[in-house]
Amino acid sequence: MVAESYERIHRSNLIGMGVMPLQFPEGTDRKSLKLTGEETISISGLSGEITAGQTLTMTVTYKDRSTATCDLKSRIDTANEAVYFVHGGILHYVVREMLKSA
Amino acid sequence: MSNDSLGKDSLNTLTSLNAGGKTFHYYSLPKAAESLGDINRLPFSLKVLLENQLRNEDGVTVDESHIDAMVQWLKDQRSDTEIQFRPARVLMQDFTGVPGVVDLAAMREAVKKAGGDPALINPLSPVDLVIDHSVMVDEFGTASAFGKNVTIEMERNQERYEFLRWGQQAFDNFRVVPPGTGICHQVNLEYLGKTVWQKEQGDKTIAYPDTLVGTDSHTTMINGLGILGWGVGGIEAEAAMLGQPVSMLIPEVVGFKVSGKLREGITATDLVLTVTEMLRNKGVVGKFVEFYGDGLKDMPVADRATIANMSPEYGATCGFFPVDEQTLKYLRLTGRDDNQVELVEAYAKAQGLWREPGHEPVYTATLELDMGEVEASMAGPKRPQDRVALKNMKSTFELLMSTAEGVPEAADSRESNLESEGGQTAVGVDDSYHHPSSQPLEMNGEQTRLDPGAVVIAAITSCTNTSNPSVMMAAGLVARKAVAKGLQTKPWVKTSLAPGSKVVTEYLNAGDFQDDLNKLGFDLVGYGCTTCIGNSGPLPDAVEKAIANGDITVASVLSGNRNFEGRIHPLVKTNWLASPPLVVAYALAGNVRLNLQKDPLGKDQDGNPVYLKDLWPSQQEVAEAVEKVKTDMFRTEYAAVFDGDATWQAIEVPETKVYKWSEDSTYIQHPPFFEGMGPEPEPVEDIRDANILALLGDSVTTDHISPAGSFSADSPAGKYLQKHGVEPKNFNSYGSRRGNHEVMMRGTFANVRIRNEMLDGVEGGFTKFVPNGEQMPVYDAAMKYQEQGIPLVVIAGKEYGTGSSRDWLPRVRACWVFVRWWLNPTRGFTAPT
């Protein structure tokens, strides 16, 4: 999910179910990138350690095969949220913890 | 976990007080101040958070650095420190609560499969689930409406209710308030909230501030009673109930100073709409708002709760009111135990949580309102912060028409058309007004005409206002005066009254107001959210046809807190928030294209024009009516709050630890979230060559993302249900089917008013399937991408996900992760077979 900004509850909901909310940097949005919806999107920087507020790189490939890149800020804001995300969501984290402690 | 043991308490703050003949231990803020320095000017809401840190200091999730950060806030009025907050309890409503319990049930299943004891999975914090979101206004304007709507609700929701009753017996720490009882926030305010909570720990009784998170965004209402709480995602609430803390940055706190008093004829609703506009302009998203100033001295908790309720509309995390004499007065009025009231007073005073006259905490920023300047107000046509002075409603609506559909025209060819169809003897319409979209309308054998601005829904609804006796009694007084003058509501208006608790009926009856309301069609339709969340039910056929034929820009007027496009009713383009007495007035007037401060609402028995001022009650009249609200009414109604009616009690409950899922159920399905889950998470991977599923603008609301209301037969959800033998009349709402991921996946981005920028000028839940350019429902496209193994992203503008606490979007995502197309196809899941 990529947006210019997120509502508070919705942002935490996305993470709670293991979806990463990503944010355009100031001054970049779908219009400045001239997106029509027919482009393809790649996002790199996810394969290492997941940390709060990390910067990722988005590459847009247009229909004519030209490309543009921009930074994206992960809106995983806290260390707890990073743990939830890595587990694929809060529920998975709790179930795994519950099984470990049993 | 710190739940069962006392914390480290490194500042040695545990001390005791006596109240109501009992000794309570508590973590003392004044004692902490001996080490931390003067903290008296910390905002009250942050004192509550500081106490939470002191009490839960475990050296892991809470340590001294967190406590110090709270104190440092006083110097900087902001903080970058993340703290872990442990609310005393969790509040749920059924739309979000059902999937919560489905998840608990699925977790039990997962633990059982992994060889563990399913009974290990229980809420660790007390959970109250109030069933309030399911009642629809199918019947209205008759004495039997309430009974019929309850019967229909029970039939429609039987599978969900059986499931919740199973949950009630299967889980510890889990209570259910049955349907037909009230709205969760009003039940919380009038009954569940304690202001000071207590818990036995070892040989001690620990007293601490009542705090909560809820799965509904208007959970904030409880801040009117000095109880810190707000809405969180269903997932976060589940985490809280499973003993996980809520992580948050220590917030900025905006102080809102109130002075003066409301003028004659101005209501609490006018006040809250003004406060909402001011705070939206100020910008308080992600911040606490705290009210202070001498204007609080005479502001009853009912008014405070109305203001606290609309925090999501002004964008704040919460709008907190500190404890004072008014708090105690309300606790007594609503029948709370004397000992409890004594504890609240003693605790608040001992902790510096009591509001003293003249005391002004330190805030990040402040703003100020002289309540004497508040004017009669509404808000609309589609955002709650867009306040419109009542006197400007006519010009506002006309401006809207001129920008949206062209200027209303003078008489045109439609007129003859209208006459030829027998539209000459219109009742209650403005003969001099002509608009090309106007349509002839036959209602109850009478010929009339439906014009732009026609009020097709007038609903006294929503916890925001129905918890407030002053505006409810004012509505009763307007009705009484209108009936005395022989006024009637216009025939095209769907009228309804749905209070947030049964106590309202008690006091409306005590004032003999219900009879007058009934005469105007405001019969009781149910105790629940109804119109406010889109459960307005169908309009009369003739009205729906006329609106559709003319594409008429009609209106709803409701005493709710939200008015987003398509939320109230798919055919109603403009929705106006107003006080309950104004709702009655607009039902009489029948059109918002009027200046109610100048134009008559109708004619009396003798043919004289009747104006709003002839019907509007004085403050004195309202005050006398409010005197009829008695403590016994609360005690009587809430004595049976967990009982439910005979139908509820007759539901058979399987007494099993693990739920027996039924494949036939179209309401409750076993979600696949945990299928194939291993003991350790899979690594995350980069996303390569994803297609764009939707390209969305600013302020996409959760109503756009995952609508809660009704859906059509030809929508993907409608087709799925018909395939499973459910006829369209039994579809119920998306919200009521949140326990079935199959329906919710199909409902994602399916709002009839969403605009996907990938398609030119198309409104509704469609997208372009890029590989062949075909236009199709979003869900269908998602499934086609999934078949081809193509990952997807959604791109949006500002404030994505604004609106309510609906959590189905991420949940839907999880399902789609499962079907291998979202973000990272393999993580945490194995492929379905």
Image (cartoon, grey):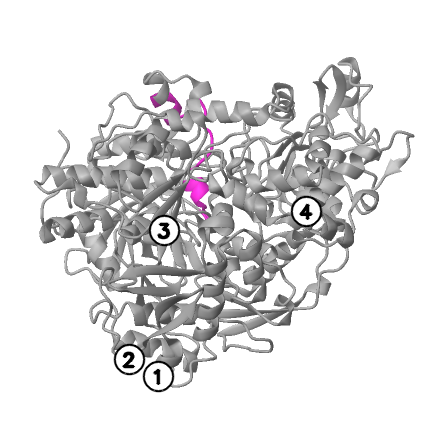
Residue B268 pos. (x, y %): 65, 54
How far from the left and from the top, in percent, is residue B479?
Answer: 74, 37
Magenta stretch, main secondary structure, is: loop
Structural distance between the alpha carbons of marks 4 and 2: 49 Å
Q: Which residue is mark 3?
A: B90
State the residue position of label 4. Answer: B628
Q: Using the image as rendered, state which of residue B645 and residue B279 is in the foreground.
A: B645
Which residue lies under the disc numbered 1? B36
Disc on the earlier residue, 3 or 4? 3
Mark 2, residue position = B11
Secondary structure beneath label 4: loop
Give yes or no for residue B700 being in the magenta stretch.
yes
Camera-nearest label, 3 or 4: 4
Which amino acid is tagged 4? Lys
What chain is tagged by disc 3? Answer: B
Label 3 in the same subunit as label 4:
yes
Residue at 65% x, 57% y: name it.
Answer: B271
Q: Nearer the viewer, mark 1 or mark 2?
A: 2
Label 3 or label 1, whichever comes before in sequence order:
1
Q: In the drawing, what numbered circle is on residue B416? A: none
Residue range of the region highlighted in magenta in the rendering: B697-720
The C terminus of chain B lies in quadrant: top left
Q: Are marks 1 and 2 in contact (CB under 8 Å)?
A: yes
